[in-house]
C-alpha cells in the first residue's frame, strides 16, 4: 500500500473563543480557520499557545485556542526558538538519589548481582535492518533457541487467506486527511447505520494498527498520526467552563468536511478530549500510548529524527509534566478516575489501576530514552528515574499476590500505627474473596487490579499484567509466574476466545453497586469479564519476551479459526467467550490489527525486542529516602518490607 503526500487544503477545527477576533480568525459554523499550508512541514507544525504557564517556566505561555502558523511565518520560527530555549530551563525540586545496595533484594532474583551495561538509546545512525541483522547474528552465534523459531517463521511468511482478508479490511479502515493517511477507524462495518463514535480515530485503538503497518514496512501513516495528534495536544478542551492541564492528548479525532461557502468545502480535524465521551472522562492513557508508539516508530524504522524535533520533544515534556505534577498522593502510582483507560465505563477501577501504572511505567522508560541529552533535560530525567524506581518497588511489593502472599494477607494484623508496619494499607483479611482461595494455582501469581487504603481489588486484569511483563515492571520471577497462571487457568482466561479483559465478572449486588446497573457491562460481557481479541498482540509480545511462544501460538490459532467467521467482532460474551458480544461492533479495527500484529510478531520474533524492555539494573540502586539522613523521621519503607516473595 502506497500513501500519498499531504496536500495544502485542510484545516484544524478550532472551537469558538473570545480571542478569535484578536487572533484574526474568521468564523463559520462554530469553527475558526486560518489558511495554512500542510501542518507536517518542519517548524510550521508548531502552534501558538498563550495565557497559561506550564513546566514551572516563567515567561512560557500556552493558550486554550490556537491557530496554525505558516512555514514561512517568521513569528513561528521565533516561537520555536523560544520554546526550545525555555524548555531547556525545565527544573524540578526532586534531588539526586544516592545509591543504597540494601534494597537490591526487592528486585534481584536468585543472587543476580551483575549489572550489565544499560543502553538508553540505540545509535541513531543505524537503520532498522542493521539492528535486526545484528540480532539475528547474535542469536545464531550463541546458539539460542530463537534460531529455530525464526526458521519456522520464515516458512510461514506467506500470508494465509485469513491474513489477506484482514489486511484488506485494515487498509479499508484507513482514514485520510488531505490525502495523507492519519489513522484507522475504530470500526468499519458497512451495515452499521449508527456508528456513534466508532467512525473516529482513537489513539489507543490505533496502536495495534500502527504496529501492524510498521512491521509490514508502511511507516508514513504512523508518522502522520504521531504528528497530527501532537498538534491536537494543546487544543482548547473545556467541560462546564473548566479546562484540564496542558499536555492532555485527545481520546480520538474525526475528519470532518466543513462548508466554506456554497460551492467550496474543506477538511478539518475535530478532536475529542473526553468532553463528548460517556461520563465526560479525560483519557489518561492516550498520552502514554502516544509516547510508547513514538518510541516503537523509532526502534522499528530507525528514523530517530522524528523524536528529536523540537515540537515532539516539547510534546513529550508536556505529557510528563502532566503525569509528574505534585499532588496530595502519598504513592508513586498515578491517581485516576473510573473510565480513564481501555475500560472507559464505570467498573470500579478508580484509584490506582494496574493498567494505568503499567502504561505509565512504560511511557516513563520510553521518554527517558527519547529526551534530548542536554542541560535542560537533566532534572527531568532525574525526576523520571526517581519515579521509575519508586513505582517499580511499589507495584512489585504491594500489588503482587500468589499463594504465599494470600496466606500472609489472611493472617494480617490490622490497625497498625507504625512506620514499619507489615500491613501498611490496613487491609482487612475478610476482603480476600472466596473464589480466589480456590482459584490461585500453586505455581503462578499475578498483580492485583488496584490498591488503595483498606482496599485491594483482587480481580485479574489482563492488559495490566501483560504490559507489566512487556515493560519489566514486574520482576523476572513475577513475569514468569503470570504466564504460568494464564497457562494453568487457560479455560478461565482464554476459553473459546482469548482473552478475558478481567476475571472474574462482577455479579448480583456487586454489579449493581459498582457499575451502577450498567446494561452494557452485565456479567461476562463487555468490560465486565468479556473476551477481547485485541489483547492478542499484547499477549503475543509478552510470551515472546518470556520465551513462551507455545502459549502465543495456541491463542493465535484459536482466534484465527473464529474471527473471520464471526466478522471480526469487538468482543465476546459469556464466561467461556462463546458468543459474539450483544452490542459488539463487527469489523472492529483493533481486533483485525491485533491479529495481524500477533502473526507478524510470530513470524519475526526478533522484532519483539523493539517493543519490550529488559530489567533496568540502574534503578535498583536509586532511593529517595537516602537523600536526607539527618532527619530521624525519615525511614525507608523498602528496608522495612517484610515480604520474602521477591527474594
Image (spheres, rainbow, N blue to C red):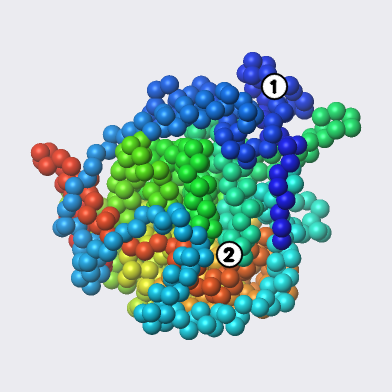
Where residue 433 appears, x then y in whole percent? 40, 65
Observer-side mark, 1 or 2, equals 2
For label 1, the residue is 25
Q: Which residue is more in the foreground, 170 or 466?
A: 170
Residue at the image point whose x is 54% and y is 45% from the top: 283
Q: Quadrant of residue 119?
A: bottom left
Question: Which residue occupies the extreme right position in the image?
Answer: 263
Q: Position of residue 27 (x, y in %)?
A: 74, 23
Residue, x 21% and y 51% (percent of image)?
637
As drawn, 232 above or below 288: above
**Mark 1 residue crowding within 10 angstroms, few (<14) / some (14–19) / many (20+):** some
Compare marks 1 and 2 and give the one earlier in the sequence. 1
In this rendering, position of residue 332 left or right of residue 99: right
Residue 230 position by quadrant? top right
What secondary structure is marked by label 1? loop
In the image, is 103 to the left or to the right of 519? left
Choose between 90 and 515: the one closer to the eye.
90
Q: List x then y, in percent, for residue 266.
A: 78, 36
Is 584 rendered above or below residue 246?
A: below
Q: Nearer the viewer, residue 433 or 394?
A: 394
Q: Is residue 253 above or below residue 457?
A: above
Q: Which residue is mark 2?
A: 215
Q: Nearer the viewer, residue 280 or 326?
A: 326
* The C terminus, quarter of image: bottom left
Which residue is pictured at 49% across the width and 33% down the height? 245
Mark 2 surroundings: few (<14), some (14-19) or many (≥20) residues within 10 A: some
What numbered label is drawn on residue 342?
none
Task: Determine whether the residue tagged by mark 2 lies in a helix, strand or loop.
Answer: helix
Q: Is residue 578 above or below residue 268?
A: below
Task: Say whether residue 600 is visible.
Answer: yes
x and y percentages locating residue 120 in the rendered image: 36, 54
Q: Disc 1 versus disc 2: distance between alpha carbons? A: 42 Å
Amino acid at each position: 500500500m502506497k500513501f500519498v503526500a499531504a496536500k495544502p487544503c485542510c484545516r484544524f477545527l478550532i472551537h469558538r473563543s473570545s480571542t478569535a477576533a484578536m487572533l484574526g480568525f474568521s468564523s463559520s459554523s462554530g469553527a475558526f480557520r486560518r489558511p495554512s499550508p500542510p501542518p507536517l512541514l518542519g517548524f510550521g507544525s508548531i502552534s501558538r499557545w498563550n495565557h497559561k504557564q506550564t513546566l514551572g517556566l516563567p515567561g512560557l505561555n500556552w493558550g486554550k485556542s490556537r491557530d496554525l502558523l505558516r512555514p514561512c511565518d517568521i513569528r513561528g520560527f521565533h516561537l520555536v526558538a523560544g520554546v526550545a530555549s525555555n524548555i531547556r530551563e525545565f527544573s524540578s525540586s526532586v534531588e539526586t538519589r544516592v545509591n543504597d545496595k540494601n534494597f537490591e533484594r526487592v528486585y534481584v532474583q536468585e543472587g543476580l548481582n551483575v549489572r550489565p551495561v544499560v543502553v538508553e538509546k540505540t545509535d541513531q545512525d543505524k537503520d532498522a535492518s542493521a539492528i535486526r541483522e545484528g540480532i539475528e547474528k547474535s542469536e545464531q552465534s550463541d546458539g539460542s533457541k530463537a534460531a529455530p523459531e525464526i526458521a519456522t517463521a520464515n516458512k510461514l511468511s506467506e500470508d494465509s487467506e485469513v491474513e489477506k482478508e484482514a489486511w484488506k479490511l485494515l487498509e479499508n479502515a484507513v482514514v485520510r486527511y488531505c490525502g495523507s493517511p492519519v489513522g484507522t477507524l475504530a470500526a468499519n462495518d458497512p451495515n452499521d447505520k449508527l456508528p456513534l463514535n466508532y467512525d473516529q480515530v482513537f489513539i489507543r485503538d490505533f496502536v495495534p494498527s500502527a504496529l501492524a503497518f510498521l512491521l509490514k514496512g508502511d511507516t508514513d501513516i504512523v508518522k502522520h498520526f504521531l504528528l497530527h495528534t501532537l498538534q491536537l495536544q494543546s487544543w482548547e478542551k473545556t467541560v462546564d467552563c473548566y479546562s484540564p492541564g496542558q499536555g492532555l492528548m485527545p481520546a480520538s479525532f474525526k475528519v470532518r468536511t466543513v462548508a466554506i461557502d456554497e460551492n467550496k468545502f474543506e477538511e478539518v480535524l475535530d478532536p475529542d478530549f473526553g468532553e463528548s465521551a460517556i461520563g465526560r472522562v479525560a483519557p489518561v492513557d492516550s498520552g502514554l500510548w502516544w509516547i510508547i508508539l513514538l518510541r516503537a516508530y523509532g526502534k522499528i524504522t530507525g528514523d530517530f529524527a522524528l523524536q528529536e524535533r523540537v515540537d515532539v520533544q516539547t510534546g513529550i515534556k508536556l505529557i510528563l509534566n502532566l503525569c509528574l505534577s505534585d499532588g496530595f498522593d502519598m504513592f508513586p502510582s498515578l491517581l485516576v478516575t473510573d473510565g480513564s483507560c481501555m475500560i472507559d465505563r464505570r467498573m470500579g477501577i478508580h484509584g490506582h489501576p494496574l493498567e494505568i501504572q503499567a502504561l505509565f511505567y512504560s511511557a516513563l522508560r520510553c521518554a527517558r530514552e527519547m529526551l534530548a541529552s542536554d542541560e535542560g533535560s537533566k532534572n527531568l530525567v532525574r525526576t523520571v528515574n526517581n519515579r521509575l524506581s519508586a513505582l517499580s518497588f511499589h507495584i512489585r511489593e504491594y500489588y503482587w499476590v500468589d499463594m504465599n502472599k494470600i496466606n500472609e494477607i489472611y493472617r494480617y494484623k490490622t490497625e497498625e500505627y507504625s512506620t514499619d508496619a507489615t500491613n501498611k494499607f490496613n487491609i482487612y483479611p475478610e476482603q480476600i474473596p472466596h473464589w480466589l482461595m480456590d482459584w490461585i494455582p500453586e505455581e503462578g501469581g499475578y498483580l492485583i487490579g488496584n490498591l488503595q487504603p483498606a482496599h485491594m481489588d483482587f480481580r485479574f486484569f489482563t492488559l495490566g499484567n501483560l504490559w507489566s511483563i512487556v515493560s519489566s515492571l514486574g520482576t523476572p520471577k513475577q513475569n514468569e509466574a503470570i504466564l504460568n497462571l494464564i497457562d494453568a487457568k487457560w479455560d478461565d482466561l482464554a476459553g473459546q476466545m482469548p482473552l478475558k479483559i478481567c476475571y472474574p465478572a462482577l455479579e448480583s449486588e456487586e454489579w449493581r453497586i459498582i457499575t451502577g446497573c450498567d446494561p452494557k457491562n452485565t456479567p461476562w460481557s463487555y468490560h465486565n469479564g468479556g473476551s477481547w481479541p485485541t489483547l492478542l498482540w499484547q499477549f503475543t509480545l509478552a510470551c515472546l519476551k518470556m520465551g513462551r511462544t507455545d502459549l502465543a501460538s495456541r491463542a493465535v490459532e484459536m482466534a484465527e479459526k473464529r474471527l473471520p467467521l464471526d466478522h471480526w467482532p469487538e468482543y465476546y460474551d459469556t464466561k467461556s467467550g462463546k458468543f459474539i458480544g450483544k452490542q459488539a461492533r463487527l469489523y472492529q479495527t483493533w481486533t483485525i490489527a491485533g491479529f495481524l500484529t500477533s502473526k507478524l510478531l510470530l513470524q519475526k520474533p526478533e522484532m519483539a525486542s523493539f517493543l519490550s524492555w529488559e530489567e533496568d539494573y540502574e534503578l535498583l540502586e536509586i532511593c529517595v529516602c537516602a537523600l536526607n539522613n539527618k532527619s530521624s523521621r525519615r525511614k525507608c519503607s523498602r528496608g522495612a518490607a517484610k515480604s520474602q516473595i521477591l527474594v
